[in-house]
Amino acid sequence: MTTPALLRLRERFPEGHITLLTPEKLRDLWLAHPAVNGIISIAPHENVFSVGRKLRAGKFDLALIFPNSPRSAIETWLAGIPQRIGYARPWRNFFLTNAIAPRSEAAKMRKRSVTEVKKLARGTGFQPVNPSLHTGQRPVPLSNAHQIHECLHLAAALGANPEPLPPTLFVTPDEIEAAKNKFRLDKITGPIFGLNAGAEYGPAKRWPIEKFIAAAREIQQRTNCVWLIFGGKADAASQRAADILSAEQNFRQDAGSTFLNLAGKTSLHELMVLLKICRVLLTNDSGPMHVAAALGTPVVVPFGSTSPELTGPGLPGDTRHHLLKSDAPCSPCFRRKCPIDFRCMNGISVERVVEAVLSLV
């Protein structure tokens, strides 16, 4: 969701040298990105002083600080960067040379309490997460509430165009061919679809696994597709992966379908390339959802505890993506685990998901 702002910065400073500071695990996202000239990665064990030393060596003129944490401001201050621009927040304004006031349109993602969730589920005591996003009990999308506008607003402080662009990541044709050869996709004759049944934040973001299996089976029977199963190492060892693989064996017996389990078997950059190859990705609200959309792959996403109005994939309103919600009055709650009956996700039917995928392909 920072990529529109980075592209606008490149547009504003075509000859500028832009270096991106990013966690080491996300470094591969930026290897071919035209908005950045260089990448500095942060290892998990590094503290503010080591990061400050790395930045000081770059002799940068200016730091644009997208995160709202005190640490991100302190690191640039320790680096001695003359201009340090970021949002005004408690415990960090001292370290900024230009503290930008929050946008009036910004919507805060506040986790609902268990008591709130239960009251909303009973239809009593409605307390909106943010008045600008809710009227009564139904969400009202605002085109400028999405998180991409937060970063664009900071870039506008440097004279960049604040109008949104689609979040965009890049892979090369040579990388696509290499991935097809490595994972033997060049032998596949049917359409290739992606399935990502995990989500790191917590179970409240995960559509039930039995629904994923049922949808995948129905879609395969109607399209003769090949499913690529994505996920991290934790997903590969989880019961969710075991359930999908068990279902795969049943599929083979009565439908002749194909699942290729790639959970935990790809690097981040290989994941990017494979997501680019897919005709569509069926996924939870997750990192792969955002990456796929930024690569131009349509996504179908059941949303429950989180808000597509605030953090949905791609550019808000992009009709290539189908973002599905139920009418649960307690959604979005922004909780990791559902304290009641998971009605937000259970209320999204297999049939809705199947039709959403088929409508895209």
Image: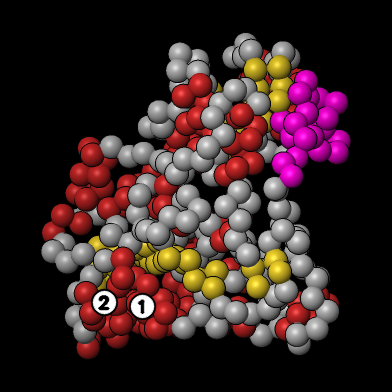
User: Residue 44 appears in which quarter of the rendering?
Assistant: top right
Looking at the picture, which amino acid does disc 2 mark?
Gln
Q: Residue placed at 76% from the left, 61% from the top? A: 131
Question: Which quadrant is the N terminus positioned in?
Answer: top right
Task: Rate crowding at label 2 as few (under 14), some (14 to 19) or many (20 or more) other CA atoms within 10 Å.
Answer: many
Q: Nearer the viewer, residue 305 or 133?
A: 133
In the image, 242 versus 26, the foreground residue is: 26
Image position of 187 (left or right of 62): left
Q: Position of residue 16 (x, y in %)?
A: 50, 15
Judging by the rendered image, the residue that carries numbered circle 2 is 220
Q: Position of residue 351 (x, y in %)?
A: 39, 83
Rendered image quadrant of residue 127: bottom right
Between the residue at mark 2 and the residue at mark 1, the CA separation in whole angstroms equals 10 Å
Please tell me whether mark 2 sits on a helix, a strand or a loop.
Answer: helix
> Which disc is residue 354 wearing?
1
**Does residue 111 belong to the magenta stretch?**
no
Residue stretch in magenta: 86-104
Question: What residue is shown at x 71% (from left), y 25% (from top)?
Answer: 85
